[in-house]
Image (cartoon, rainbow, N blue to C red):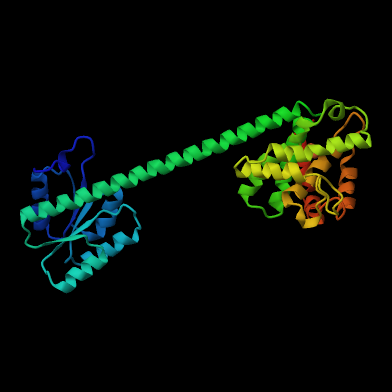
């Protein structure tokens, strides 16, 4: 054989489906191709069986008779195309009629090339080889693209995971400086995610908030010990220093260059804003406060009320709920509070899952 497609050792044998209702024709085709070195040949005498044989293993070429009973070549091509296979192999049509009409109809139906019956052996083998060459190149490109896409997906996941890991480490750093426990962070962020989900956020956005909310107090890293660790209530001037943690957190997370750090920055910056505009650091009001900040305000305050501090006893669940209800429209976004009140069983479940 002139070329070595049929004998290439590194690649598998090209698989060729031979579809013809005439046993004599099938035997002739088989003999010619076998003689040329092709090994993976699948004769199909009943065209009804074509799709069954096609499904058994990926084919690289289909040699198809046009004139067959019940399922003719056009019908066979229509069935093959209906599969929507991106790697549908080329179809080489065998036909006794070389009328212009038949040729055009075959091309429209998906034929790639023709051989007239009775066929010339050399011509047939050349056309088979050309079509196989083209298809194997096409298949290789297709497979390479799939590998590349998989690699890109893998790298994207790794990038996402390493960003997430770094942010979590940053969050741990802040915990060392704060009286708020790790479990406060977990309860608060899971509650925030619960509310975001109930408010109709997409799963991706909910996930972002879940991972970003733990950063809400990251700016406390920049607050002096004598204020941050003071066991008593803060004096007004000390409060002013303490309030700076929102701004400091936002500056720390600025320019992170990804959705996650951007969400974290937004939460750090706005979790102490109040619906009526009396919050800090910017005194934003109503919907000028990003919804992530309004959600985190509810989740953060609720959990803080239930936690013991050196200067206060923990509130009861009921009184904390009552506090949120009375703060709807002043401190809190009323819509978020309504949503919170509807989710009380789930909120309790989060508390049970991450106890102090
Ligand atoms: Fe805070
Ligand atoms: Fe907090």
Ligand 1's image quarter is: top right
Determine which quarter of the picture holds residue 8.
top left
Image location of residue 283, percent across then percent down: 83, 50
The residue lying at 43 percent from left, 41 percent from top is 150
The residue lying at 24 percent from left, 50 percent from top is 135
Count the marks: how many? 0
Camera-nearest residue between 70 and 313: 313
Image location of residue 224, percent across then percent down: 82, 28
Which quarter shows the C terminus?
top right
Which quarter shows the N terminus?
top left
The residue lying at 27 percent from left, 52 percent from top is 54
Whether residue 16 is visible: no
Question: Compared with residue 200, is residue 237 higher up or lower down, i.e. above or below?
Answer: above
Determine which quarter of the picture holds residue 227.
top right
93 lies left or right of 341? left
Camera-nearest residue between 46 and 157: 157
């Amino acid at each position: 054989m002139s070329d070595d497609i049929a004998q290439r050792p590194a690649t598998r044998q090209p698989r060729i489906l031979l579809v013809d209702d005439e046993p004599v024709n099938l035997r002739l085709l088989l003999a010619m191709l076998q003689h040329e070195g092709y090994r993976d040949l699948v004769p199909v005498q009943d065209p009804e069986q074509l799709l069954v044989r096609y499904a058994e293993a990926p084919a690289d070429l289909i040699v198809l008779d046009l004139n067959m009973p019940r399922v003719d070549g056009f019908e066979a091509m229509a069935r093959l195309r209906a599969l929507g296979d991106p790697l549908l192999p080329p179809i080489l049509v065998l036909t006794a009629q070389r009328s212009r009409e038949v040729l055009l109809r075959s091309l429209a139906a998906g034929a790639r090339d023709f051989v007239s019956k009775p066929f010339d052996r050399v011509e047939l083998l050349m056309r088979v080889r050309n079509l196989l060459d083209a298809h194997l190149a096409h298949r290789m490109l297709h497979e390479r693209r799939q590998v590349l896409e998989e690699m890109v997906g893998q790298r994207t996941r790794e990038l996402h995971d390493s960003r997430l890991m770094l942010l979590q480490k940053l969050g741990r750093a802040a915990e060392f400086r704060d009286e708020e426990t790790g479990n406060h962070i977990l309860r608060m962020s899971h509650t925030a995610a619960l509310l975001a989900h109930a408010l109709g956020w997409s799963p991706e956005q909910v996930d972002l908030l879940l991972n970003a909310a733990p950063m809400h107090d990251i700016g406390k890293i920049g607050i002096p010990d004598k204020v941050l660790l003071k066991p008593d209530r803060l004096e007004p001037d000390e409060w002013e220093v303490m309030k700076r943690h929102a701004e400091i957190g936002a500056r720390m997370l600025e320019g992170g260059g990804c959705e996650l750090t951007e969400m974290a920055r937004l939460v750090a910056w706005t979790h102490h804003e109040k619906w009526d505009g009396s919050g800090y650091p910017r005194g934003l009001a109503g919907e000028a406060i990003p919804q992530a900040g309004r959600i985190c305000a509810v989740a953060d305050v609720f959990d803080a009320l239930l936690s013991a501090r050196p200067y206060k006893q923990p509130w009861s669940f009921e009184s904390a709920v009552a506090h949120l209800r009375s703060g709807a429209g002043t401190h809190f976004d009323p819509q978020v509070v309504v949503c919170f009140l509807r989710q009380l069983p789930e909120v309790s479940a989060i508390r049970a899952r991450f106890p102090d």
